Amino acid sequence: MSTTSTDNEAILSLARPDIVALAPYEHALYAPTLERLHANELPWPPHSESPGSSLHRYPEPQPAALVAALAAHYGVSAEQILVGRGSDEGIDLLTRAFCRAGYDAVVTCPPTFGMYAVAARIQGAEVLSVPLGNDYSLDHAGVIAALDRRVKLVWLCSPNNPTGNTLEAASIRRVLEAARGRALVVVDEAYIEFSTQPSWIGALSDYPHLIILRTLSKAQGLAGARIGTVIASPTVIRLLRKIIPPYAIARPAAVAAEQALQPHNRAIALERITRICAERERLRAALARSPWVKHVYPSAANFLLLATTNARSVLERLQAVSLLARDFSGKPALEEAVRLTVGTPEQNDRVIAALECGT
Ligand SMILES: Cc1ncc(COP(=O)(O)O)c(C=O)c1O
C-alpha cells in the first residue's frame, strides 16, 4: 500500500489530537511458549469447558491467525486490518478516534444504517444528513456541499441498508475526490457479497482517506460470533488499535471465524450466497404480484425493501405465519415500507402465500 508521509499527516490531522497522543493500555504480553503468571488468570481451564479452548486465558488482542486469514480473504495486508466485535465496533471506534465531542461532525445519507448517527450522538458529534435522492441514489453534490471543516467522517453504505441498492461508483468517486485531505470516507460493504459490484477495497491505494467496513455477520453467516473488519491505511488502523478494548475478540469467536474462512467453508458460503440471490429474485418477482405491495425495490443485498399499501397489515399477515419482518414505516422517505430478509425457500414460500402473491 503506497501511503506517503503526507497522506499519513493528513489522516493524523483529522484524528482527535488527544487520541494521536494517547499512550494505549499495555495488555499482558501474548507469548504462547511461556507460562502465564502475568495476567491474574486462574491456572486451570473452567470445569465445564471442552478441552483445548483455554478459556481461562485472555485471548490475543488482535488474533494474528485471524488477522492473517482476513487479510488473505480481503486481499490486503495485515497492517490494513482491524478486527472488531462486528462492524458495529468499527463504526464506534472510527467515530471516537476522529470526532471531538461538541466540535466535529459526520455526514450520513438516510435512509441508511442507523448506527452511524447513533455512534456520532453517543460521542457528542453532530450528524449532518444528506438524504439519498431519487431511487435512493447518492446525492454526491449534497455530500460535497456539506463537507465543512467540522466534518471528519462521511458514511456511505453500499449496498445500502435498508434500501438494498448499491450507490453509483461515479458518485462515490466524486465524494472521494472532494474529501481528499479534508475528511475520511467510509464505505460500509456489509452486504457486498450479495452484489455483482466490485468491492471498493481495490481503490484503497488511490485514496488513503478511504475506509472499508466488512463483516462476517451477513454472507458468511456468523452474526453470532460478532466479527467485523475495518480495512484502511495502516495509519488509521494503528489509531483504532490504540482505542479498541484490550482483549476484545473472544477466542471462540476467533476460532469460529478462522474456520469459516477455510477454503472448504468458503466454498459452502459461496454456494449459499448464490442460493440467497436466486431466492431474492424469486421473491421479488412474486411480491410484485401481491395486492399488499406497491413496489419491490431492486436489491443487491440479502433483503428486499417493500413499499406496501399498509405496513401494519403486511407485518400482521407475516406474523400470522410466524415470520418477522422489519417495520420502516413512518421513517422519512420510507412511508409504509417493510424490509424483509430473504430466508429459506420454505420461509419464502410462506411469505408468498401470506401476501397473496398468486402464481
Ligand atoms: C450496513 C450495516 N453495517 C453494519 C452492520 C453491523 O454488522 P455487524 O456489527 O454484525 O458486523 C449492519 C447490521 O445490520 C448493517 O446492516
Image (cartoon, rainbow, N blue to C red):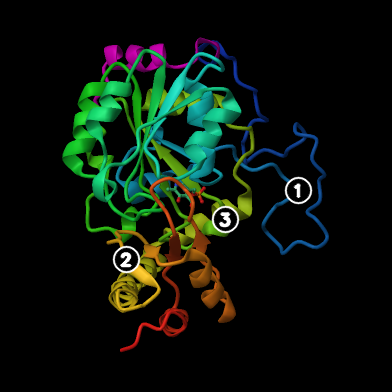
Q: On the rendered structure, is 225 left or right of 145?
A: right
Kindly report the distance in space between the C-alpha atoms of the residues bearing marks 3 and 1: 19 Å
Mark 1–mark 2 distance (CA, rounded to whole Å): 50 Å
Q: Nearer the viewer, mark 1 or mark 2?
A: 2
Task: Say which of 30 and 113 sits in front.
Answer: 113
N-terminal of the two: label 1 or label 2? 1
**Residue shown at 50%/28% (left/top)?**
95
Neighbourhood count class around disc 2 (C-alpha, 10 Å): few under 14, some 14–19, many 20 upward: many
Is 69 on the left-hand or right-hand side of 298? Answer: right
Residue located beneath label 1 in the image: 56
Asked if disc 1 and disc 2 are in contact, CB closer than 8 Å, the reply is no
Label 3 or label 1, whichever lies nearer to me, is 3
The kind of secondary structure element at disc 2 is strand
| Amino acid at pointer 3 | Ala
Q: Is mark 3 within 8 Å of ligand 1?
A: no
Q: Where the C terminus falls, by quadrant? A: bottom left
Depth check, mark 2 against mark 3: the one in front is: 2
Residue 280's spot in the image, x, y percent?
33, 71
Q: Quadrant of the N terminus?
A: top left
Magenta segment, which residues?
1-18
Q: Which residue is mark 3?
A: 225
Q: Secondary structure at mark 3?
A: helix
The residue labelled by disc 2 is 296
Along the line of sight, which residue is nearer the eye, 345 or 30? 345
Residue type at mark 1 is His
Other-residue count near label 3 (Cα within 10 Å), few / some / many at <14 / 14–19 / ≥20: many
Helix, strand or loop at mark 1: loop
Give the percent coordinates (x, y) of residue 93: 52, 31
Q: Report x, y in % for residue 56.
A: 75, 48
Quadrant in which residue 184 is drawn:
top left
